[in-house]
Amino acid sequence: MEEIELYDVIKILHIAAVISWFAGLLYLPRIFVYHTQVAVGSETDKIFQIMEKKLMHFIMLPSILLVFAFGFYLASEIGFGFVWLHIKITLVLILAAYHGFLSRCRKNFALGKNKYSEKFYRIINEVPAVLMIIIIALVILKPF
């Protein structure tokens, strides 16, 4: 049996962190869809706020930090000289900005100041899925 390389262990941990992060990126806007349908200050509103806060703080935040830490290690090991990697990093930074946007939306819900409609959250819920497909294609195909 071959010895397990540190690079492979980090890659496994990176993929696990990505899966956890995407679980949150895909689920939080779906919670927002339902949260828009309840009265501000109601018991259901408070339950949604708790769900959203726990998802953000206990799953999404640790996951994004691990994604970036492990991803930086992996990229530094192969080198940053690949066009596909630059595109991937750009898309991941867009996802990080999206994460920040969702965090702001969560805070607005907590303040009773949601600015967006159910339809808006349904539409933006597709953003991470589309970017995920492009990122996976870049990593597997390495077209550039």
Image (cartoon, rainbow, N blue to C red):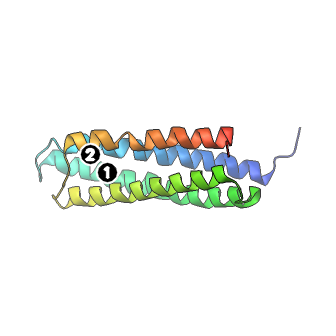
Q: Are marks 2 and 1 in contact (CB under 8 Å)?
A: yes
Q: Is 70 on the left or on the right of 129, as rendered?
A: right
Out of 11 and 43, give the one closest to the viewer: 11
The image quadrant where one finds the N terminus is: top right
Numbered disc in front, either 2 or 1: 2
Out of 77 and 137, give the one closest to the viewer: 137
Residue 31: x and y in percent read: 29, 43
Q: Residue at x 45, y 51 (%)?
A: 59
Q: Is 123 on the left or on the right of 140, as rendered?
A: left
Q: Residue at x 28, y 39 (%)?
A: 122
Say the numbered circle drawn on residue 52: 1
Q: Secondary structure at mark 1?
A: helix
Q: Residue at x 75, y 55 (%)?
A: 78
Q: Which residue is mark 2?
A: 32
Considering only vertical position in the picture, is 78 above or below 128? below
Considering only vertical position in the picture, is 127 above or below 61? above
Residue 2: x and y in percent read: 88, 41
